[in-house]
Image (tube, helix red, strand yellow):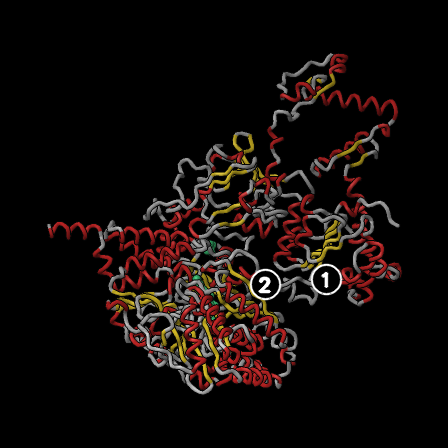
């Protein structure tokens, strides 16, 4: 296709959508599928078929609408009035929604938490968010490229192809975008490194391994808007001079894989991928590689070994992938959320993106908000928002009337942040200063019933299971740390064990080969920093001493 | 050259050298368990951490590329503390059985525990691996001693090219295994024993070594392997005139530490009871001459086989041979006697033998078993290069950019040479194999030209044809060193790739590709070691008996 054909395709799709009386969108992302969106789809389909006005309405699937704990979700869009969002929808409720919507009736008020209730869209959960990367998530049908194109899809690519690769790198660098995979390395700078690295053959890798327990930002993005990640990747390839790209997605994400496969196929068919993209000189092909579900395979060097067909083990850096990556060639590796931000930056400009966020952390970040909150789900917020706003405004406060104890960010590589730091702005530097990290975007809220040594032990067990075993501090050290934490939790530890624990944590942190081992002690170190009293109260000697006093 | 400082000592190295190699080359010993000079850095043991000015954290020196002006410290209180903690973790997962361990005295972990004063672990002792495997006659695998340095896996992969073992499972449960845990003999293992050689602990030990004494009781007897022409150095560890096990040693010019199964394990003949250690005379002759028998114990199989012989003293035997030879010369002249020598004997013995024939007996009737295999190459090489032997040292092979192998099943016939080839390929060299058979090297080949048997010369002629046609030949070099080149060029003119393809069954485009790769020394990947000195890569031709013993030429 030629660039000028793109708006024609977009207009055609827009006209098609406008010709419908209304559009019924049901979420077909993994969380809603799990809570029964299959039955919702059947219910909607049947009701539309049985209704004489059904033909004039459109039914489409979308990706995640955000408030996963209230799924399955359905949204009904009208040309002339605001959309209506329904929560906890089931088959029966679907029929009622169709009947009401086609008849133009306002939905009847029903009891909270009952099926098919209307969920107001002006609640802080929605209004406090800023959707940049997820702008199309829950809005478009992820399996139809036409829908993506009707929502400005591939316009950023057209624009980028009109710039020089250097200009594209510059634009990204000026935007201040930093890697969303955890380390927060400036994306534009990384692109420049790959661009200027010697070699004709270069690769781009989209890291969709997403191994943090409880995190599902990347999966959701790939499921809800696969083309935006793909488009970001094509732009990246153009900017760095790569000919081949790989999506690395874990095998536990079959829906994401299916949608990416489809997106690649559709984009190739439209000439947006493959030889001479949009009639230009630039050619780029993309393949998918499926990971076997090892956390360490999200680490860039292990990931590349895995793509090469070897055992997914990290290796020492330097050389960095930008110098010597896949098969020894310069390789750009970015997280899928990082790539998901590219189209907006190219379309709206670096300055616009630079205007969101804090001094050193620009743009928005997606978090998988979980734990003891009233509202859990997937949120996108501007950098610099405070934890308090996330927990109390967006999350609706701690559930069941309990009180807030800590927020865990960064998953097994992160730390716990106590109540006294709730007003900390969420950005790379502030979280690091508190002994945690931004990480990939897992955010677990714990209430006063959580035992912090037990939380630390949970994450350490994860690291023990996921350590690749290559270097001794991580392989053996994590097992020993876990052993001590078990003793603590069992009430059998003594003060000397805590001392050994602290020393061991520092050794593992300082001597491990890759980020997994280097960050594995973080949950222990941060809970010791803020909740040491909990550890001490659990000491065997202290426990028996207390028993004596009370006797 | 770049200059940096390690432990206050100014050091100059070539760019790309690691801090570890720079230190070792300058007599600075950095503790290390997973480093091996012949293997790529792994970075798993974390003992080699050093401090670098301007870097916040200690860095493993085995993976640290030297940079100009770097200031490195290999010793400090911080490093000592970190190393102690690391060794502490190692020994929490490794029995400290040193008093009964066969490896004691040669164990690297024991050495560092000693150096850093670690007597026991401060952690809970927990073994990640406990398997004991003795599924083959050559070596045992005792996993409790394994420290997962992965040197065995890496040597099998990077040097031998057998890929017989890998680390399976992960984390604390990681262990070294064959695919699907099949017995060693059913795997790709070629039993070269290189894994045993590089193992720093008692996890891999030769069967012959088990319970045969402490390391320090064994003597070193260095010699050259007699099996093939590679000439590998072997260090026999002996005790009381008995070989306990064989090992390679880094200074051995041909092979370094690596050997093949024959060199490493094929020495049992030396102390086999069936070995002939006495001269023997036929019984009837001995009776006729009235020779007296020496007291001599025969091996079990010899007793039957040698029933017709009588052992005699060396003096008696030599007198008998001398008398018989003298009688033959007297009766029919020196040319009635002929001698045939063997490549199994050392050069010096062969020299003396021909001296005996020529000077003492007075005949030129002396020949050698290499007549069969080597005569054609001696004359061919002599004519082409002025000497009838290999043109380059074996160690050059690893630095070649393009290897052209034909008429040689190197992996089986000269395994140690094949290791060098594998190393070259693993570091990016291209490999062209011309052979009708799918020899093991084809697995590593960039290009395999499978000729019909007996048609390889068509391919060679066509390659020469293409090189000349495309102007890839180095005309100056040729002009300075050859004569009769134009006749040669004319002789290959008819042999186009298409003609060769018809005769040999190798597609013409593959022949052209091979010609280009060989002529230009094209690598499969990576930069040539010779990039600075020449535009073209360096190619090597490797052939053996499949070429020298070919007889037809049509
Ligand atoms: C143990 C470990 C796991 C990781 N897992 C992921 C992951 O699942 N997804 C990801 O994008 N990055 C992951 N990373 C970070 C990557 O190594 C790499 O920094 C990132 O993909 C770069 O992309 P970015 O610059 O866009 O963030 C992981 C790092 C470590 C040490
Ligand atoms: S020798 Fe460098 S990490 Fe083992």
- Image coordinates of residue A476 in percent, x first then y, are 39, 51
A362 horizontally vs A319: left or right: left
Q: Which residue is mark 1?
A: B517
Residue annotated with mark 2: A327
Is residue B1 toward the left or the right of residue A479 in the image? right
**Does the residue tagged 2 have its C-beta within 8 Å of any atom of ligand 1?**
no
Along the line of sight, the residue nearer the viewer: A531 or B190:
A531
Instruction: Return the x and y of residue A231 as percentages of the image width and height.
Output: 54, 76
Choose between B61 and B332: the one closer to the eye. Answer: B61
* Number of numbered discs on residues: 2
Within 10 Å of disc 2 (Cα), the crowding (few <14, some 14-19, many 20+) is some
Marks 1 and 2: which is nearer the front?
2
Which secondary structure lies at badge 1? helix
Q: Position of residue A210 (x, y in %)?
A: 45, 65
Q: Chain of mark 2?
A: A
Q: In the rendering, which numbered label is found on residue A330? A: none
- Residue A343 picture location, percent across and down: 51, 80
Q: Considering only vertical position in the picture, is B329 above or below B97?
A: above
Name the subunit of mark 1: B
Which residue is depicted at the point 62% across and 48% down? B253
Quadrant in which residue B83 is drawn: bottom left
Q: Disc 1 versus disc 2: distance between alpha carbons? A: 20 Å
Label 1 packing within 10 angstroms: few (<14), some (14-19), many (20+): many
Tell which of A287 and A243 is nearer to you. A287
Furthest-bottom residue in this view: A80
Residue at image position (37%, 68%) is A69
When asked about the image quadrant of residue A505, the answer is bottom left
Nearer to the camera, A99 or A544:
A99
Do we see residue A301 in this rendering? no
Quadrant in which the N terminus of chain B is drawn: bottom right
Left or right of A498? Residue B148 is right
Q: Is residue A133 left or right of residue B314?
A: left
């Amino acid at each position: 296709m030629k660039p000028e054909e793109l708006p024609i395709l977009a207009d055609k799709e827009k006209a098609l959508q406008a010709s419908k009386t209304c559009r019924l969108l049901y979420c077909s992302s993994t969380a809603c599928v799990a809570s029964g969106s299959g039955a919702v789809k059947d219910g909607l389909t049947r009701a539309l078929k049985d209704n004489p006005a059904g033909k004039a309405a459109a039914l489409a699937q979308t990706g995640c609408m955000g408030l996963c704990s209230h799924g399955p979700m359905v949204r009904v869009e009208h040309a002339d009035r605001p959309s209506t969002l329904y929560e906890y929808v089931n088959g029966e409720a679907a029929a009622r929604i169709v009947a009401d919507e086609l008849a133009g009736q306002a939905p009847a008020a029903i009891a909270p938490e009952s099926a098919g209730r209307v969920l107001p869209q002006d609640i802080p959960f929605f209004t406090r968010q800023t959707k940049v990367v997820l702008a199309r998530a829950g809005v478009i049908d992820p399996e139809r490229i036409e829908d993506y194109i009707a929502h400005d899809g591939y316009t950023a690519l057209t624009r980028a192809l009109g710039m020089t690769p250097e200009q594209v790198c510059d634009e990204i660098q000026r935007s201040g975008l930093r890697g969303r995979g955890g380390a927060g390395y400036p994306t534009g700078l990384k692109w420049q490194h790959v661009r200027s690295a010697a070699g004709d053959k270069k690769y781009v890798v989209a890291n969709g391994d997403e191994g943090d327990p409880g995190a599902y930002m990347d999966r959701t993005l790939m499921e809800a808007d696969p083309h935006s990640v793909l488009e970001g990747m094509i732009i990246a390839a153009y900017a760095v001079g790569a000919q081949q790209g790989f999506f690395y997605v874990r095998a536990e994400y079959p829906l994401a894989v299916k949608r990416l496969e489809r997106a690649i196929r559709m984009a190739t068919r439209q000439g947006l991928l493959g030889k001479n993209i949009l009639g230009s000189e630039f050619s780029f092909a993309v393949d998918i590689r499926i990971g076997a579900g090892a956390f360490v395979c999200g680490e860039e060097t292990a990931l590349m070994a895995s793509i090469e067909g070897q055992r997914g083990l990290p290796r020492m850096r330097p050389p960095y992938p930008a110098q010597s990556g896949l098969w020894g060639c310069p390789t750009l590796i970015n997280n899928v959320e990082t790539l998901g931000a590219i189209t907006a930056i190219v379309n709206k400009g670096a300055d616009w993106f630079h205007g969101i966020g804090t001094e050193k952390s620009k743009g928005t970040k997606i978090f998988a908000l979980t734990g003891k909150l009233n509202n859990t789900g997937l949120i996108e917020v501007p950098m610099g928002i405070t934890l308090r706003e996330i927990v109390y405004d967006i999350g609706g406060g701690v559930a069941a009337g309990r009180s807030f104890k800590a927020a865990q960010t960064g998953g097994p590589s992160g730390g716990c942040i106590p109540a006294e730091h709730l007003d900390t702005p969420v950005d790379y530097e502030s979280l690091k200063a508190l002994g945690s990290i931004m990480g990939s975007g897992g955010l677990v809220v714990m209430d006063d019933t959580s035992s912090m040594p037990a939380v630390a032990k949970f994450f350490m067990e994860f690291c023990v299971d996921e350590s690749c075993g290559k270097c001794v501090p991580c392989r053996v050290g994590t097992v020993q740390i876990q052993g001590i934490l078990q003793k603590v939790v069992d009430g059998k530890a003594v003060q000397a064990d805590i001392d050994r624990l602290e020393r061991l944590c520092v050794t593992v942190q300082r001597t491990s080969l890759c980020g997994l081992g280097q960050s594995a002690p973080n949950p222990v170190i941060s809970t010791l920093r803020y909740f040491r009293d909990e550890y001490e109260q659990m000491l065997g000697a202290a426990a028996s001493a207390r028993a004596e006093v009370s006797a | 050259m770049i200059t940096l400082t390690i432990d206050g000592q100014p050091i100059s190295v070539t760019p790309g050298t690691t801090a570890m190699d720079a230190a070792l080359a300058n007599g600075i010993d950095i503790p290390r368990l997973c480093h091996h000079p012949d293997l790529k850095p792994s970075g798993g043991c974390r003992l080699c951490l050093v401090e670098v000015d301007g870097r916040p954290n200690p860095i493993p020196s085995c993976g640290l590329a030297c940079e100009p002006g770097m200031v490195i410290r290999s010793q400090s209180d911080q490093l000592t503390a970190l190393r102690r903690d690391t060794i502490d973790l190692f020994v929490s997962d490794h029995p400290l059985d040193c008093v009964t361990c066969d490896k004691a005295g040669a164990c690297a972990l024991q050495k560092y525990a000693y150096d850093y004063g670690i007597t026991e672990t401060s952690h809970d002792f927990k073994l990640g691996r406990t398997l004991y495997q003795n599924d083959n006659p050559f070596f045992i695998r005792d996993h409790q001693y394994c420290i997962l340095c992965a040197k065995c896996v890496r040597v099998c992969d990077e040097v031998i090219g057998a890929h017989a073992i890998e680390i399976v499972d992960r984390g604390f449960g990681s262990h070294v295994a064959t695919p699907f845990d099949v017995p060693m003999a059913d795997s790709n293992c070629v039993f070269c024993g290189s894994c045993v050689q590089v193992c720093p602990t008692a996890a891999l030990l030769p069967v012959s070594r088990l319970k045969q004494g402490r390391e320090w009781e064994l003597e070193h007897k260095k010699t050259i392997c007699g099996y093939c022409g590679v000439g590998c150095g072997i260090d026999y560890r002996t005790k009381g005139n008995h070989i306990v096990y064989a090992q390679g040693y880094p200074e051995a010019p041909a092979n370094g530490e690596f050997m093949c199964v024959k060199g490493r394990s094929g020495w049992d003949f030396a102390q086999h009871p069936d070995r002939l250690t006495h001269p023997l005379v036929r019984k009837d002759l001995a009776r006729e001459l009235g020779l007296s028998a020496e007291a001599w114990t025969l091996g079990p199989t010899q007793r039957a086989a040698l029933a017709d012989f009588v052992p005699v003293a060396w003096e008696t035997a030599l007198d008998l041979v001398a008398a018989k030879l003298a009688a033959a010369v007297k009766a029919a002249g020196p040319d009635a006697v002929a001698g045939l020598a063997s490549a199994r004997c050392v050069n010096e013995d062969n020299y003396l033998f021909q001296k005996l024939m020529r000077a003492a007996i007075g005949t030129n009737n002396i020949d050698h078993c290499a007549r069969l295999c080597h005569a054609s190459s001696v004359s061919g090489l002599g004519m082409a290069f002025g000497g009838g032997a290999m043109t380059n040292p074996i160690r050059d092979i690893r630095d070649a950019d393009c290897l052209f192998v034909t008429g040689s099943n190197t992996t089986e016939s000269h395994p140690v040479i094949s290791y060098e080839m594998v190393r070259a390929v693993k570091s990016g060299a291209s490999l062209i194999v011309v052979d009708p058979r799918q020899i093991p090297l084809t697995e590593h080949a960039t290009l395999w030209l499978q000729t019909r048997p007996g048609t390889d010369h068509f391919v060679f002629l066509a390659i020469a044809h293409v090189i000349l046609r495309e102007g890839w030949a180095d005309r100056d070099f040729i002009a300075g060193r050859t004569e009769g080149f134009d006749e040669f060029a004319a002789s290959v003119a008819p042999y186009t790739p298409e003609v060769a393809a018809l005769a040999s069954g190798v597609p013409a485009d593959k022949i052209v590709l091979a010609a280009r790769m060989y002529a230009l020394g094209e690598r499969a990947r990576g930069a040539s070691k010779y990039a600075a000195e020449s535009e073209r890569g360096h190619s090597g031709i490797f052939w053996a008996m499949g070429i020298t013993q070919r007889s037809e030429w049509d």
